[in-house]
Image: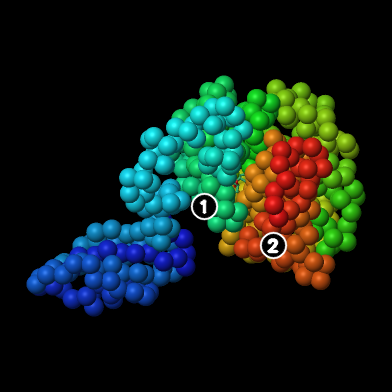
């Protein structure tokens, strides 16, 4: 059932009718009886005794398509050729394409974009490699690189299955920040193999956005690439998430009249995202953070083979709380979930402090659905597009890379991340702030603009900008 469309969604049924044996009305009635609502009909092919039609059908329940298929099996003269939903149709052939900026209309054009004239441009770059930034796509191009090892919360589903997410990130880069991003899914999960491959492809890119690479390998991969490349390398699940989380938390704390230093914060899922979010919270002044992973609360009297967990245990949970999620959440002000769907229960939230803040950010299924918890919380947010308060790294990565590319930053540093977080939080004024509006919408055009502006300023002030963009 994993590929079944979700409730309330639209599917498209391609059916073939033998018009000597049956009528369209029979098919329509079967669909209605199975819980489907036909909202459009397209005739695809027709002949004297055969017709093929696409029926766009709203489904009320997840098992409606299955029930329609069963009903058709019993009806002579009706054949179900295919069921697709709009999401799958949108993915047919992939979601992005490459387009030339100018058409090649004659031999003159051809000789400029290609041999022989292109050779002069190649020689110019050979003499001065920094010209690659002005004379090639490098200036505006980001590689979105994954090994498919931690795709959303789906786990290690490999490079082929990771592609739709990476294509989606490339679309978002382009639409929101006019960055040309290319999805690259690697058929290796070997740390050295990934580092060598990214270094080898780097000449064509002005930045590297690492995506959905599992921890702890992601830490070393990013660290080494940062040291060995002179373009920004940014692990989105760590830093993009941390930036947006921090922005959202600043606003949620403001709304509930709390200070970050006093807030008791539980981070669940100490992987790539959970670790980076915690580092940003500590840098922002948080003093009471407890981390919980599958084996329970991380404590400093335990030795962890995972170096990042060892670091984590030494820098959090000063009061030495032991146990699991339930124990960690007693009297906590904030829950930050970056773990797995459905693991937070109402019973957990009811033991939290008054006016709890719940950020259930696992994708695609949050730790708890807002409708299950909204009567218990002051603020709830998820990473999804279909609920209010979407805390998702898409609020950060387009704008932070736009800024970094525009000022040709050599890295994306802490100052730039902090500037991006403050920019996102600032898009919502005090008057506008409310329980359903702690982070701006992805479609708010001020987000990228403001993030870019402050990121360029921060890069310049911290000495990593290599040019000043025209405003
Ligand atoms: N909203 C966003 O912008 C955003 C950004 C990044 C990641 N995420 C989501 O956060 C989750 C983690 O992503 P990641 O990149 O850090 O992955 P990761 O694989 O690096 O880390 C996941 C961590 O969660 C832990 N975990 C899994 N199940 C758990 C459970 N039942 N209880 C406690 N801990 C558990 C794992 O042991 C691991 O340490 C995913 O669901 C991902 O989709 C959301
Ligand atoms: O892809 C997303 O929606 C956010 C994030 O990068 C994730 O891995 O969940
Ligand atoms: Mg991700």
Q: Position of residue 350 (x, y in %)?
A: 77, 57
Q: CA distance from mark 2 to mark 1?
A: 19 Å
Residue placed furthest toward the bottom: 25
* Vertical comparison of 262 with 314: above or below: below
**Picture quadrant where residue 384 is located:** bottom right
Q: Residues within 10 Å of mark 1 (few under 14, many from 20)?
A: many
Q: Which residue is mark 1?
A: 171
**Residue 400 visible (yes or no):** no
Q: Is mark 2 within 8 Å of ligand 1?
A: no
- Which sits earlier in the primary sequence, circle 2 or circle 1? 1
Q: Position of residue 257 (x, y in %)?
A: 88, 61
Q: Residue at x 84, y 45 (%)?
A: 284
* Vertical comparison of 378 with 42: above or below: above
Where's ligand 1: which quadrant? Answer: top right
Q: Which residue is mark 2?
A: 446
Q: Quick one: 140 or 218, which is closer to the camera?
A: 140
* Vertical comparison of 60 with 348: above or below: below
Q: Residue at x 87, y 45 (%)?
A: 285
Q: Tag 1, which secondary structure?
A: helix
Q: Position of residue 147 (x, y in %)?
A: 52, 34
Q: Is mark 1 within 8 Å of ligand 2?
A: no
Q: Residues within 10 Å of mark 2 (few under 14, many from 20)?
A: some
Q: Quick one: 162 or 9, which is closer to the camera?
A: 162
């Amino acid at each position: 059932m994993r590929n079944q469309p979700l409730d309330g969604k639209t599917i498209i049924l391609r059916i073939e009718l033998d018009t000597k044996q049956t009528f369209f009305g029979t098919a329509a009635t079967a669909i209605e009886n199975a819980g489907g609502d036909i909202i459009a009909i397209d005739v695809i092919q027709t002949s004297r005794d055969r017709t093929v039609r696409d029926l766009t059908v709203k489904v009320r329940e997840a098992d409606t398509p299955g029930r329609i298929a069963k009903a058709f099996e019993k009806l002579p003269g009706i054949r179900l050729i295919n069921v697709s939903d709009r999401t799958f149709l949108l993915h047919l052939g992939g979601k992005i394409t490459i387009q030339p900026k100018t058409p090649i209309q004659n031999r003159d054009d051809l000789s400029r974009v290609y041999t022989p004239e292109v050779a002069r441009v190649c020689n110019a770059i050979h003499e001065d490699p920094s010209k690659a930034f002005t004379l090639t796509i490098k200036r505006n191009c980001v590689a979105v690189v994954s090994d498919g090892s931690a795709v959303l919360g789906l786990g290690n589903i490999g490079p082929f299955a990771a592609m739709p997410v990476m294509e989606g990130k490339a679309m978002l880069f382009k639409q929101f920040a006019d960055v040309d991003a290319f999805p690259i899914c690697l058929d290796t999960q070997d740390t050295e193999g990934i580092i060598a491959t990214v270094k080898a492809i780097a000449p064509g890119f002005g930045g590297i956005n690492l995506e959905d690479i599992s921890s702890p390998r992601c830490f070393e991969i990013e660290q080494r690439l940062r040291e060995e490349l002179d373009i920004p390398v940014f692990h989105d699940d760590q830093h993009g998430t941390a930036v947006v989380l921090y922005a959202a938390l600043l606003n949620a704390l403001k709304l509930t009249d709390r200070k970050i230093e006093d807030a008791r914060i539980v981070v669940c899922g100490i992987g790539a995202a959970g670790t980076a979010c915690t580092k940003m919270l500590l840098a922002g002044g948080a003093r009471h953070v407890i981390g919980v992973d599958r084996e329970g609360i991380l404590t400093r009297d335990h030795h962890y083979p995972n170096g990042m967990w060892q670091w984590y245990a030494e820098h959090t949970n000063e009061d030495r709380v032991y146990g699991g999620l339930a124990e960690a959440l007693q009297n906590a002000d904030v829950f930050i979930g970056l773990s797995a769907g459905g693991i937070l229960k109402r019973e957990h939230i009811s033991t939290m402090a008054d006016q709890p803040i719940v950020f259930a950010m696992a994708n695609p299924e949050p730790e708890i659905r807002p409708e299950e918890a909204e009567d218990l919380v002051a603020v709830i947010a998820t990473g999804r597009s279909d609920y209010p308060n979407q805390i998702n790294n898409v609020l950060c990565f387009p704008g932070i890379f736009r800024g970094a590319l525009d000022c040709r930053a050599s890295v994306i540093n802490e100052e730039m991340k902090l500037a991006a977080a403050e920019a996102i939080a600032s898009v919502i004024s005090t008057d506008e702030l409310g329980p359903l509006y702690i982070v701006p919408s992805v479609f708010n055009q001020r987000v990228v603009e403001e993030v870019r502006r402050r990121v360029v300023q921060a890069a310049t002030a911290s000495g990593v900008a290599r040019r000043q963009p025209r405003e």
